[in-house]
Each structure stands twice: as structure tokens, then as C-alpha cells.
Amino acid sequence: TANAKKDPSCKVCNISVGR
């Protein structure tokens, strides 16, 4: 999600979302 990209706490989610 776009929020995950802004959320440093969800940096792991960023990898899941594809960066």
C-alpha cells in the first residue's frame, strides 16, 4: 500500500509490496 511506503515501521511491507 502507499501508506506502507511512507511508514518506516512497515519497511518490511515495502519489500512485500515490491519496494
Image (cartoon, helix red, strand yellow):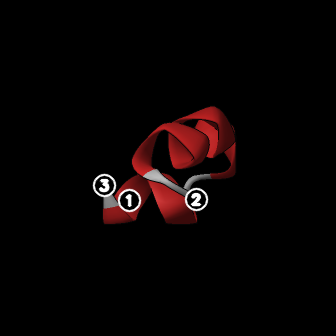
Q: Is residue 7 left or right of residue 9?
A: left
Kind of residue at disc 1: Asn
Instruction: Indicate which label's residue lies in the foreground, 1 or 3.
Output: 3
Point 56% across, 53% down: residue:
7
Q: Which residue is mark 1?
A: 3
Query: In this rendering, is residue 4 above or below 6?
Result: above
Q: Residue furthest left?
A: 1
Q: CA distance from mark 3 to mark 2?
A: 10 Å
Q: CA distance from mark 1 to mark 2?
A: 12 Å
Give the crowd class for mark 2: few <14, some 14-19, many >=20 residues within 10 Å.
few
Q: Which residue is mark 2?
A: 19
Q: Is residue 4 left or right of residue 12?
A: left
Q: Which residue is mark 3?
A: 1
Give the crowd class for mark 3: few <14, some 14-19, many >=20 residues within 10 Å.
few
Which element type, helix, strand or loop, lies under badge 1?
helix
Q: Foreground residue, 6 or 15?
A: 15
Query: In this rendering, is residue 1 above or below 11?
Result: below
Which element type, helix, strand or loop, lies under badge 3?
loop
Q: Position of residue 17 (x, y in %)?
A: 42, 48
Q: CA distance from mark 1 to mark 3?
A: 5 Å
